[in-house]
Image (spheres, rainbow, N blue to C red):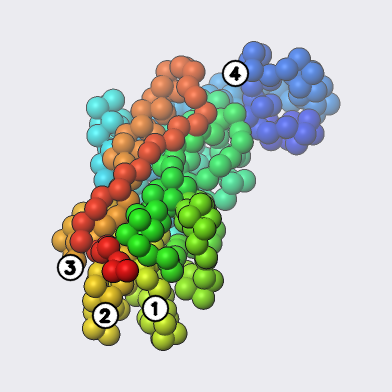
Amino acid sequence: MATIKDVAKLAGVAVSTASYALNNSKRISTATKERVEEAARQLNYKKNGIASDLKRTKTNTIALILSDLSGPYYSELIKGVQDVTTANGFDLIACSSIGDQQSTAVKFLKEKRVDGAIILAHNISDAITIESAQAGFPVIVLDRDLIDENVYHVEVDNTEGGFIATECLIKHGHENIAYIGGPSASLDNQKRFDGYKQALEQYQLPSHSKWNSIGYFTKEGGYKATKLLIAQGELPDAIFYGNDEMAIGGLQAFQEKNIRIPEDISIIGFDDIQLAEYVHPPLTTIKQPKYEVGALAVHLIFQLLEGKNINSHYKLSTELIERKSVMLKKQ
């Protein structure tokens, strides 16, 4: 028996588009609607009134799919999602997409075991995300740019944050500035690096590739990347770490070599996790609205479940938090 996926494939459209067309949605052009209907006729596809492609039993549950549930960045994000979910009488399932848990996360999406999903997991592919998003099953992504009528975006302005962080170091007199970033596949990392490069270009400062490395957004990764930088024998004036965890790992590496922060080298992080103000010295960083991102993402899901029209894209700003890890360089 033909399925809606078979119809979509023959018509050369997304599954969601085929569903809209067969349900007489005004979103779909007449030409596309006719193409989908012709494909359905060729395949003798019949919608089942009891088990329609779009008809599912409500679960009153929202899924939050994250790369890592243990990172300190995620706690405030989860709280934002949890507060709004609970206020609406729904349950929340937070699921990791790392290792064996990835298959479980994909099942939540493909099998519609929840009423909507929020994704911050770079290892959940764009193809799976688009395939899963359908009318009546909203998907909010926090970590990528996707063009699909059923995928909605909430993001922090990481490019702005990367620029502000680098500009802070420049305005303190630092000219040779390193960047230690996250995974190359991470869009957040790419945009923070773009902001870093834009600031250097605007202030006509060089970018030194020998000082730019990957720390994978982890404390251990930041520690190892900083050790590598120290081993080169020539330190930059300052380092912009793509997140606070890596910066904290870097602090440890510098302390082991008796390199003083900020007297010998200034550092700045990104995220403003709770630990950032308690390390020594307290970390200057870029604060991003983690709670607000989570709260807005799930609020949008409820708007969509109610049939409301929303924007496809939302962007939240960052803020510089100045503490003690950046010092004015003596001329």
- Towards the viewer: 134 or 285: 285
**CB contact under 8 Å: marks 4 and 3:** no
Bin the neighbour count of mark 3 within 10 Å (Cα to Cα): few under 14, some 14-19, many 20 and up: some
One can see residue 173 in this view: yes
Residue at disc 2, secondary structure: loop
- Towards the viewer: 163 or 277: 163
> Label for residue 49?
4
Instruction: Please give left or right for residue 194 compared with residue 93 in the image.
Output: right
Say which residue appears at 64% left-offset and 25% top-offset.
19
Q: What amino acid is found at the position of numbered circle 2 in the picture? A: Ile
Q: What amino acid is found at the position of numbered circle 3 in the picture? A: His
Q: Mark 2 or mark 1, which has the lower sequence index? A: 1
Q: Position of residue 156 (x, y in %)?
A: 41, 42
> Label for residue 259?
2
Q: Quadrant of residue 117?
A: top left
Q: Mark 4 or mark 1, which has the lower sequence index? A: 4
* Disc nearest the viewer among 2 and 3: 2
Q: What amino acid is found at the position of numbered circle 4 in the picture? A: Gly
* Disc nearest the viewer among 4 and 1: 1
Say which residue appears at 73% left-offset and 17% top-offset.
29
* Disc nearest the viewer among 3 and 1: 1
Where is mark 3, residue-wise? 280
Q: Mark 2 or mark 3, which has the lower sequence index? A: 2
Where is mark 1, residue-wise? 235
Q: Mark 3 or mark 1, which has the lower sequence index? A: 1
Q: CA distance from mark 2 to mark 1?
A: 10 Å
Residue at disc 3, secondary structure: loop
Bin the neighbour count of mark 4 within 10 Å (Cα to Cα): few under 14, some 14-19, many 20 and up: few
Q: What amino acid is found at the position of numbered circle 1 in the picture? A: Leu
**CB contact under 8 Å: marks 2 and 1:** yes
Q: CA distance from mark 2 to mark 3?
A: 13 Å
Say which residue appears at 27% left-offset and 63% top-offset.
328
